[in-house]
Image (spheres, rainbow, N blue to C red):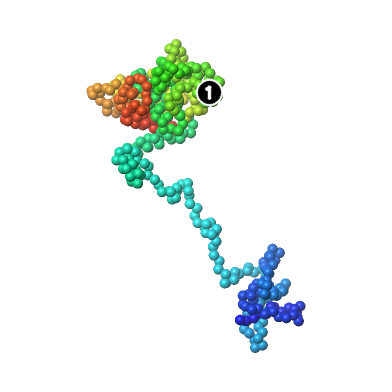
Amino acid sequence: MPAVTPPSNPNDAGKPVTRRSSWAEAAAAADATKPSRAPSAAAPVSPSPSVTPAPARPAAPIAAVPSAASSSGEVAAEAAVPPSDAPAETPSFRRSRPTVADTIADAPMPDFISSPGLFVKEQKPRPVGGFRGALYNLTGGAWNLGPGPKQRQEDELARRISRQLQGSYNTAILSLKGGIGKTSTTVGVGLTLAEYRGDAPCAIDANPDSGDLVERALGEGIYQQSTPRTISDLLENIDSIDSLTSLARYMHHAGRLHLIAGEQDPEVSDSLTAEEYRRIRKLISSYYSVVLTDCGTGVTHNAMSGILQSADNLVIAAGYAVSGAKRARSTLQWLASHGYEDLARNAIVVITDKDEVSSRVDKDAIEEHLSGICRELIAVPHDRGVADGDLVTLDVLKPETRRAYKEIAAAIVDGYR
């Protein structure tokens, strides 16, 4: 192994020469003599205990390198080092490897929000009923064919009904003739909204002719046993109502459907004005995102202008009769010619088969007559749970009737923009 002597220095004259036992120690000693680019910030290098470092020359530092041995057995070589301002080069025997932090920083960041499917396998919805549901239950969920077309349609209706809303919206349900399913539609749709929406809806009985909205939602007996607070009581104390708790004293509850009863006294039932209705609507809008207003028969009573001015869409009740179709068409024409053209164009016409009309009535012709003048036309089949004029509950209705109310509710929420 060649030996290396440190650089000669006049001050070291007479001192014994320390020989290096290896090339690595000689290189370490040479590195120790090199000044850094920023001498003030560099830390001194501690030499190995077995190596005596050579003092560095301030002006021209010299590095010791191994060389061939001379005949006398002593080897000495001096090599000039570049100026101190030259960039230091990494020794060729050192290999630069990326750290774990560098690898993570260079890797693309996955999007956990917009691409959840990259990390979680999509699970099919559970089928309900039919062959698919039976197979799912029989295999304990091992075989999941997913919902069938009918269930997918039902799920889509539920999604439309439960859509989150920003603000408060009002739907007016009206007709030109009584006894054709206007109030039953209000109750059925209101109960459907309460079933599928996260926020409770509110229904207001603004019928000037002693409306029976609350009786149809609660039942005559339950309503008579409760405190008969009406819309007149609400108006009398409206200035003192500043919370949902105080408002609840003037409301009735059919499950999650909250209702304001109409005035039953015939002497004051027609006294509700447009301004009074607007005050009620302003109060209700602070606590409910969906409001249904049962307007009663006709479009010219005192409160009607206030109802139409605050309505976001309309439901026109009609029946399977020539006169019922004509009245529904006349209602839409009246609205369009009195400044409510948008409401008429986006109206939902509901035809209720309340009296199970005879086979001589051409239902298809009536539907075709009305479908072209409204946004959507929906038919409610004949159902004794609606036709008897008493309590309306979703549990006793036919599946076809419940689906019709779901379609109406979905169409109503679709119109809230």
Q: Residue furthest bottom?
A: 71
In percent of width and height, residue 181 lies at: 35, 22
Say whether residue 41 is visible.
yes
Q: Residues within 10 Å of mark 1 (few under 14, many from 20)?
A: few
Which of the two residues, 263 or 142, is positioned nearer the viewer here?
Answer: 142
The answer to which of 327 and 378 lies nearer the viewer is: 378
- Farthest residue toward the left? 360
In what element is the residue under mark 1? helix
Q: Residue 79's x, y, as percent?
A: 65, 78
Residue in view at x 71 percent, y 80 percent: 17
Residue 47 lies, with reference to residue 128, above or below; the image says: below
Which image quadrant is residue 292 in? top left
User: Left or right: where does residue 19 sit relative to residue 355?
Assistant: right
**Left or right: 242 in relation to 11:** left
Quadrant including the C terminus: top left
Q: Give the total number of marks visible in the rendering.
A: 1
Q: Quadrant of residue 388?
A: top left
- Name the kind of residue labelled 1 in the image: Ser
Q: Is residue 21 above or below residue 375?
A: below
Q: Residue at x 65, y 86 (%)?
A: 73
Placement of 105 over or under 370, stated as above or below: below
The structure residue drawn at horizontal position 55% and vertical position 20%, both measured from the top left corner, is: 239
In the shown orientation, is residue 199 left or right of residue 41? left
- Depth check: give the residue in front, 138 or 242: 138
Residue 177: image location, x then y, percent:
35, 19
Q: Is residue 273 visible?
A: no
Image quarter (top left, top right, bottom left or bottom right) of the N terminus:
bottom right
Residue, disc 1: 246
Q: Residue at x 35, y 20 (%)?
A: 389
Residue 77 horizontal/vertical position (percent): 66, 80
